[in-house]
Image (cartoon, helix red, strand yellow):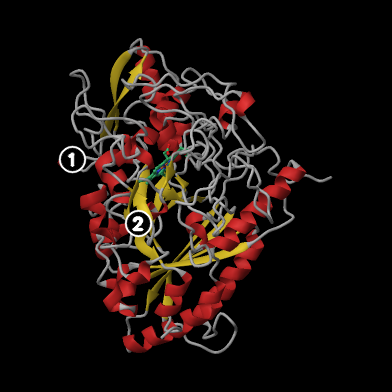
Amino acid sequence: MTLSCNDSVPIRETPAVNLLTSHPADPARPPVPNEPPLAVCNIQGNIIGGFNKDHQTMLFLRVRRDGDVRGHLAAFKRWLHEFVPFIATAEEVLAFNRLFKAIRQRNQAETRTIQATWINIAFSFEALSMLAPNDAEQFTDEAFREGLAKRAVARLGDPADLEMEGNPKNWVFGGPGNEADVVIIVASDDAQDLAATVDRIEASIYGGRSPKGGPLASGVQVVYKQQGATLPLPLTGHEHFGFLDGVSQPAIRGRLSDDPTDVLTLRQNPNDPDQGKPGQDLLWPGEFVFGYAGQKGDATEAEGGVAAKGPDSLVGNAPELARDGSFLVVRRLRQDVAGFHAFLRETAQKLTAKGHDIIADELGARLVGRWKSGAPVLRAPGADLPALAADDCANNNFEFQEPTARIPAAKAGPTQCSDHVFKQSEGDKTGAICPFAGHIRKTYPRDDTGTLSPKIGEVSTQTHRLLRRGIPFGQPYFEPKDASKTPDDGNRGLVFAAYQTSIVEQFEFVQGSWANNVDFKDARVEGRVQAGHDLIIGQSNANGVRARRCRVSVGGSQIEVEAPVDWVIPTGGGYFFAPSIEALRTLAGSKP
Ligand code: HEM
């Protein structure tokens, strides 16, 4: 048998479920009649399913503003009408992903038996205001209404200096006057299938031909075409700095049909019915899709705490048209890989010279909160542990405050998790293992609480989660022998993409109130220096200087480290809304 080039990539995912019938006796599929059936035929596939493909192109479009704008808009609606049948639904993507996993488990290797190319679409507020002004007006999310370019400096900390690459004026797309009205995501298992599909879409946009081949003007232009792809071995599944990505995602409650056991997320923790995999709290779907109950952000323990059901995400926030849709944030983030690694090396050397022994890899792991393999530092404090990273039942099973309990093998059935091989987490109340500024602690502080602000706590934290769907762009950077003489000015980075139902409370909150906020969490712990910035994505314009700093614990001492420049540089993006299939038909004028 010829094995594919991805064979050495560890398989870290949910077990394959029975494809055609439900299993009422399966403990991973308990009856949950109180959880809502999700309209999987109406929800776009990338939102709750996740395309999860190796190759992706994003086409950013702008409705033509020259000449007869109303005519261009009418043309775009006709074009959209023909395009809607090509949009992949959650039902198809989830069914494909299940079948793919089933075949892969049978093969015990990567499989090319089935492949797919998926398309999804999303619109800016300005585009919705042109297509459906009365509906657009009912969106209350200020971030979505204003758009990314206007809020990038003030809310996200992007460079205020007009000369800097990261200032929205210099973005490759999405800056002032260059904003995209529409983003089309095309994702495929196969680079050639992807290219052929993108060619067909571009031909329909430029060639006066409809997606079905008939004659038609589209009324739009491509303002930017962003390629993305998973990195080649040995970096497959990792982002450009070298860390495994896509390890932790929120688990979502809800069912795929009227069958009470047909759960979207398997319940694999025998110790906790409110988790998917161990450590992965189940969240109400309204956090990510409009028209469903979300989290109750101020729930008490008596009300169920993190498990408490909150209000419908649509009511008071968005028009009926938004039902089964989701906001999509796209950020094109260039990564200075050489700069990041030089910082780690030089800082580790300086600290070691002062008697605080640390090596570059360990410093990097502390700043992320995971080792390059993906192993969480809370469960592997001293050295990387790739076997832990490869175990999906264990690699998210930790909290920052409380210790975790082992899950004995005796409890595990074929779909249930056990977690007794690796040392459990003891918790880390003082930031001695994972700094409060560590990327995963900043962006999802789990059970961290605030001693200074009662607003910080696990229940409210669960209202600031993101469904991440990013993919790297550009070729990997391999360090030359003399790194100091070769600056990394390459065009590589992450196309960050995330779905949510509030851009203000989710993406902007995570970036602005947590990653950039030196006081999060807790301004001063025991009178020492502030927690500082998330040195991976945190940004600062303080006093016109971009330098950032954070506190790391080395050998029991709290040390402040400073990052003089940014290694993650925003170079484009936009705030979009991904409507349901039905809403797309309405926007295209196909429905009365
Ligand atoms: C180039 C930029 C970025 C890099 C290199 C990066 C890297 C990583 C890595 C290595 C992880 C750990 C693996 C995982 O759980 O998937 C992670 C997790 C995460 N990142 Fe990022 N990230 C970037 C940008 C962002 C941005 C812009 C945000 C949001 C504002 C963000 C939010 C998150 C969240 C929410 C998690 C999961 C935390 C958890 O649940 O434990 N990341 N990121």
The image shows residue 570 at horizontal and vertical percentages of 35, 51
Q: Residue furthest top?
A: 355
- The amino acid type found where label 2 is placed reads Thr
Which part of the image, by quadrant, shows the N terminus?
top right
Residue under the point 58% across and 88% down: 214
Task: Please state if 114 lies on the left or on the right of 183 as rendered.
Answer: right
Is 438 located above or below residue 296 in the figure?
above
In the image, residue 69 sits, relative to residue 483, either above or below, namely below
Q: Residue at x 56, y 33 (%)?
A: 393
Image height of 82 relative to 284, above or below: below
Q: Does label 1 point to a residue whose CB lies under 8 Å from ligand 1?
A: no
Question: Mark 1 highlights which residue?
Answer: 542
Question: Label 2 vs label 1: CA separation?
Answer: 30 Å
Residue 303 percent location from the top left of the image: 31, 40
Per the image, label 2 sits on a secondary structure element best described as loop
Look at 31% across and 34% down and name the residue there: 301
The amino acid type of the residue labelled 1 equals Ala
Which x, y percent locates residue 228?
A: 52, 55
Q: Which mark is residue 198?
A: none
> Is residue 492 at least partly visible in the picture?
yes
Residue 36 found in image quarter: bottom left
Give the residue pinned by disc 2: 501
The residue lying toward the viewer, choosing from 134 and 540, is 134
Q: Is residue 559 left or right of residue 268?
A: left
Q: Quadrant of residue 555?
A: top left
Q: Between residue 532 and residue 387, name the one nearer to us.
A: 387
Give how far across and how far down residue 110 sits, in percent. 71, 46
